Amino acid sequence: MEILNAVVSALSMAFLMGWEILWALILGFALSGVVQAVVTKGEMSRLLPDTSPRSIVIASALGIASSSCSYAAVALARSMFRKGADFVAAMAFQFASTNLVVELGIILAVLMGWQFVAAEYAGGVIMIVLLTVMLWAVMTRERIEEARRQADRGVAGRMEGHATMDMSVGGGGSILARITSPKGFTAISHYFVMDWASIWIDIVLGLLIAGALAAWVPKEFWQAFFLSADPVGSKIIGPLIGPLVAIVSFVCSVGNVPLAAVLWNGGISFGGVIAFLFADLIILPILDIYRRYYGLRIAMPLLGVSYAAMAGAAYVVELAFGVAGLVPQQRSAQIIETHITWNYTTWLNIVFLALAALLVWRFLRTGGPEMLRMMNQSAPAEAQQHS
């Protein structure tokens, strides 16, 4: 009976966490669909020919606009690399597309507060700069050629089809006209549903892990684990431990935000939370994809450089936000309500569930299920057009 009560408690917490962020998830993915609908993938590789600052800035901007789940971002980065994009620029694109996106900011704001949103975006820019500089030093011409030879073998990962599909609305007219056109509405609905399909497992897994940890692990354990009684020690160890927790938790993209809230309430440092959030691209399944995409001799340095960039950016954020007095003093991230009530969250959920239903209806009426079946298949090199 005690075991059953513990399981019910964890599941209840997971459900209430999901209810708390449901409207924000729908809003984030809808906005992501709008952005993706007006940004074409066809020109991405051409825009990233080298490792110049201009290419890195463009890569980061394209990453933000593409707003992919972690698996699709990794697959799309390899596709761009195979089509001629610079390896370092492709990596900058990949990290921007999961760490600087609108849906992540919305969920962070709802669960943890605006300080974490500001830290995520500021730290994300710093991380990409550090990553670029270190990759410049590590990725010699020989290593890049080795990575290209392995990439050209086309070994399958995850979300290959999703990464190469291009349903964006080209042509003339203003952005608003393209978005509100029938073709634009269709593209938005397809991106919305397929983004959900690509990431729902990670979201559910993240909620279940966060619910279990919140229900079962006493706060005293987290406080001891993160050295929260030692202000200096916790700031030193937090950015080093944060990515390691992410690596073994198997949760990526926005799915790790509820767990980040649990860790923050448990005592991890501010910088540790940010480093944990950054680490969605070095979880164990994605490390295995790096091995398949680029070979073990490239995957290992990529892991080391990524980890160093994440921890380094988190230290900078910890210091800068601490000096500016922007680190929250209260560890009271609002993970869940005690029960569902007729508050603003419920009303927002109803409104955005109606929006989701409208987008799903459009998706089903315009050949969406056929596109959905192609998501985990290896798609042809040419981006697929759809209207």
Image (cartoon, rainbow, N blue to C red):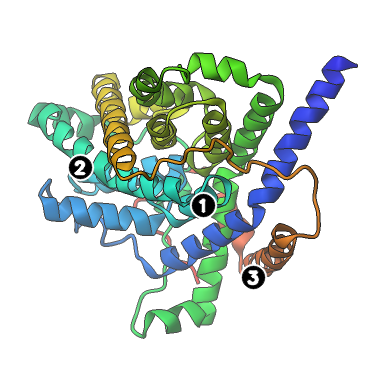
Q: Which residue is mark 3?
A: 362
Between discs 3 and 2, the one toward the N terminus: 2
At numbered mark 3, what does the secondary structure look like: helix, strand or loop? helix
Name the residue: 52% across, 34% down.
Answer: 260
Residue 212 visible: yes
Label 1 close to label 2 by CB (< 8 Å): no
Residue 24's disc is none
Q: Which residue is mark 1?
A: 109
Q: Relative to 55, is 351 above or below? A: below
Q: Secondary structure at mark 1?
A: helix
Q: Is residue 109 left or right of residue 174?
A: right
> Callout 3 environment at 10 Å: few (<14), some (14 to 19), or many (20+)?
many
In front of the other: 346 or 174: 346
| Rendered view: 164 above or below 142 | below
The image shows residue 385 at horizontal and vertical percentages of 43, 65
Residue under circle 2? 129
